[in-house]
Every structure is written in C-alpha cells, then in structure tokens.
Amino acid sequence: MPWLWFFLEYGFDRDSTLKAERLKHCVTERDWNTLQQQSKTAVEELPFGPHWFTRLKARMAADPVYVGAKRYVDMDLPTTTDSGTGAQLAAAEAAHT
C-alpha cells in the first residue's frame, strides 16, 4: 500500500495531469531487498501500509463514535427504499439500545 501513497503524493502535476513517466521511472530498479533498514522502517510506516492499518483498526475499535456507527453499518437492512423501511428499522434499533 505504500505505493498508493507514493502515487497520490507524486503521481500528479499541479494541474492534475498524470506523471506517467515519473511513476514508470526505475520501476525495475525498485527492490525492497536493497533498502537499508532505516528506509524499510520508513516505508513500513507510510500511510496505507500494514502498520498504519493496524494502528487505524486499534484506534477505530476504541472510538465510541465509530463503534456506535458500525452497529448501523453491520445491520441487515433491506435494500429497498420502499416506505423508508431501512430508516424505520434503524430508528427502531436505536430506540432499543
């Protein structure tokens, strides 16, 4: 996932055009095994990397707002919008908690 961060950070010009050549430059030379330990650690800590996701999951699990909102996301609601059934079920669930 650090490549996603790199792409978002360096993959576009200020006018939002893609910097395809910059992204393709030296792709074959990019080798994780050749990085120094400090560089590996820095890459592992970039946004969207595995360590970042682990910290994010822990923070979200401890966040009461996220926990409360997740209850509604995880509810098995009908996919129809007829008569606002989903909204009615969500309101009924909220009333009973």
Image: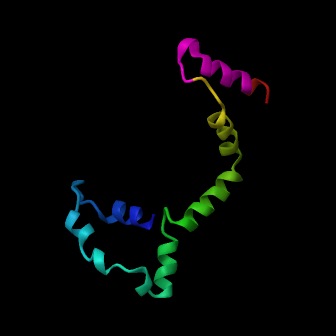
Observer-nearest of 70 and 9: 70
The answer to whether residue 35 is left or right of residue 24 is: right
Q: As displayed, is residue 3 above or below residue 68?
A: below
Observer-nearest of 32 and 38: 32
Residue drawn 41% across the image and 63% down it: 5
Main secondary-structure element of the magenta-colored stretch: helix
Q: Quadrant of residue 57?
A: bottom right
Query: Which stretch did the figure color magenta?
Result: 79-93
Residue that extends furthest to the right in the rendered view of this protein: 96
The answer to whether residue 28 is left or right of residue 88 is: left
Residue drawn 67% across the image and 21% down it: 89
Asked if the stretch drawn in magenta spans residue 76, the answer is no
Residue drawn 61% across the image and 17% down it: 85
The answer to whether residue 76 is left or right of residue 1 is: right
Asked if the stretch drawn in magenta spans residue 82, the answer is yes
Q: Could you say where residue 93 lies in the image, as x and y percent from the top left?
A: 73, 26
Q: Could you say where residue 36 lies in the image, as x and y percent from the top left?
A: 46, 88
Q: Could you say where residue 17 lies in the image, as x and y percent from the top left?
A: 21, 55
Position of the N terminus, as image quadrant, is bottom left
Q: Could you say where residue 66 lies in the image, as x and y percent from the top left?
A: 65, 44
Q: Quadrant of residue 29?
A: bottom left
